[in-house]
Image: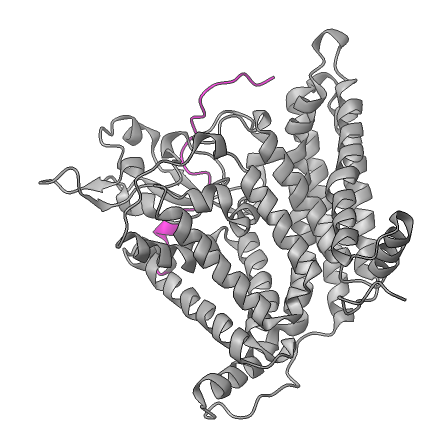
Amino acid sequence: MLQARSLQPGPPSGADVLRWPVIGRFLRWRHARRSVQLVLLATALLVVLHGFTGPDLAPQNAGTVLTWVHYRGLLVVTLLAAGNLFCLGCPFILVRDAARRLRQPRRGWPRVLRSKWTGIALLVLVLFAYELFDLWSLPAGTAWLVLGYFAGAVAIDVVFTGAGFCKYVCPIGQFNFAASTISPLEIQVRDQSTCRSCATVDCIRGRRDASRPDVVTQRGCELHLFLPSKAGNLDCTFCLDCVQACPHDNVALAARAPGAELTDDRPRSSIGRPSRRTDLAVLAVVFTFGAVLNAFAMTSPVYAVEKWVAGAIGIRSEALVLAVVFAAALGAAPFFLLGGASLLTRWTAPPADRPAVTLTFRRFAASLLPLGFALWLAHYGFHFLTGALTIIPVTQSAAADLLGWMALGDPWWTWVGMRPGSVLPLQLGVVVLGAFGSIAVAYAIADREHPYAAARAALPWALVTVLIAAVSIWVFLQPMEMRGTSLAG
């Protein structure tokens, strides 16, 4: 069994993207992040303006189409292909940085809030609001949600130093942190010996003005990930501040085996030992079971479930009924399934060395993430592929509505995307691959913690994975329905 010790990663495990001729040069450019942020800020402004002033019909409004079809689809595809690049280009932080020029934060983030619980609660709240208010069909509601993110980032980060909003609060950030554990790229140290001889630790403190040491000319990592002991993508926004701050050019954006960090339980910078973090385990659970719930809510059987719940508990309030469904899907179901798996795995250990059930849960919860990511990819990928070309007519519509500019012509509303039936095989294949990934991670964790009975220790988690995958496949085979129907009748 691995002993607790400081994590000392070796040299980059694969090709360093920062050394590539074109992409690498761009990423190493001092203004790379700012240029990406400006593009996404312009997109966010379009979402807000057209959301408030454009057509109420969601498929013809840039606010809803760009947010719920293109942004979500590109988000998961980018996380799969490259990593947390959308956090790199986050426009909320661009506006926050501008606000900090007017008011510098003075306080450190409260110690009692230094966990993922706030972000997890807000992630559940956003998923709940999405279903309750049918945000996918409300351009103005979507615009208000985007403005809420901007307001939250500014309000929090002009009071507290560092990146408290990103690290502890932002629901999108928590989603991205969980998903990026499956990504093929990771910020790493190129040469540990260079870090050992470094006396300035600029990657954390930031680069200082030689004549005025109190003046930071390039900030370091605001999420407090000390590169020599950093590992994995959890809490890393790919901001590349460490790349700019390091005076030794010792930072790599290296290729690695996707999901490899899920099997490593050694302590790491700013995070500690993952198996001691209940909040990280719960984030993995919400990420995975939330994916099933979010996909199920777009199918016809969801109405039968909601009506049954309404009749069983004698209430007609849609909000209360939906709250019961959420409690069952994100609370009761994980509690019994994962609690049972933890008990069965615990019993594989010798009686004198059986870990607590909660420790077993924390150790194995990470194995859910490959399947969870596959479910989000299958779901968001479906909407993206079946609506990819809608970006053309909604852009034409937005130009006409906001600028009175018809140079782009009349909207081509017949441009949509792939047929749903042609996307289904891709969805099912992604789910199966994700299930295999989760089973492989569960076995690797079992081999680490229960080497004398790895297969038996991993079996309960493999069965849970197969069950979740089977339910998800059934969900994707159901006909899609418009949501927001009244419970009456």
Rendered image quadrant of residue 215? top left
Q: In which quarter of the image is the N terminus?
A: top right
Q: Is 14 a magenta residue?
A: yes
Question: Relative to residue 437, is residue 25 drawn left or right?
Answer: left
Magenta extent: 1-22
Q: Residue at 68% x, 24% y: name it.
A: 358
Residue in front for this viewpoint, 202 or 444: 202
Q: Residue at 76% x, 34% y: name it.
A: 335
Q: Where is residue 256 in the image (x, y as percent from the top left)?
A: 51, 42
Residue in front for this viewpoint, 268 or 130: 130
Q: How many labels does the image show?
A: 0
Q: Residue at 52% x, 81% y: name it.
A: 395
Q: Quadrant of the C terminus?
A: bottom right
Q: 428 above or below 328?
A: below
Q: 453 above or below 271?
A: above
Q: Position of residue 166 (x, y in %)?
A: 45, 46
Residue 64 visible in the shown view: yes
Question: Relative to residue 77, is residue 418 drawn left or right?
Answer: right
Q: Position of residue 99 (x, y in %)?
A: 32, 56
Rendered image quadrant of residue 32? bottom left
Question: Relative to residue 194, is residue 133 drawn left or right?
Answer: right
Question: Looking at the magenta stretch, what is its main secondary structure?
Answer: loop
Question: Relative to residue 194, is residue 325 drawn left or right?
Answer: right
Q: Is 484 a magenta residue?
A: no
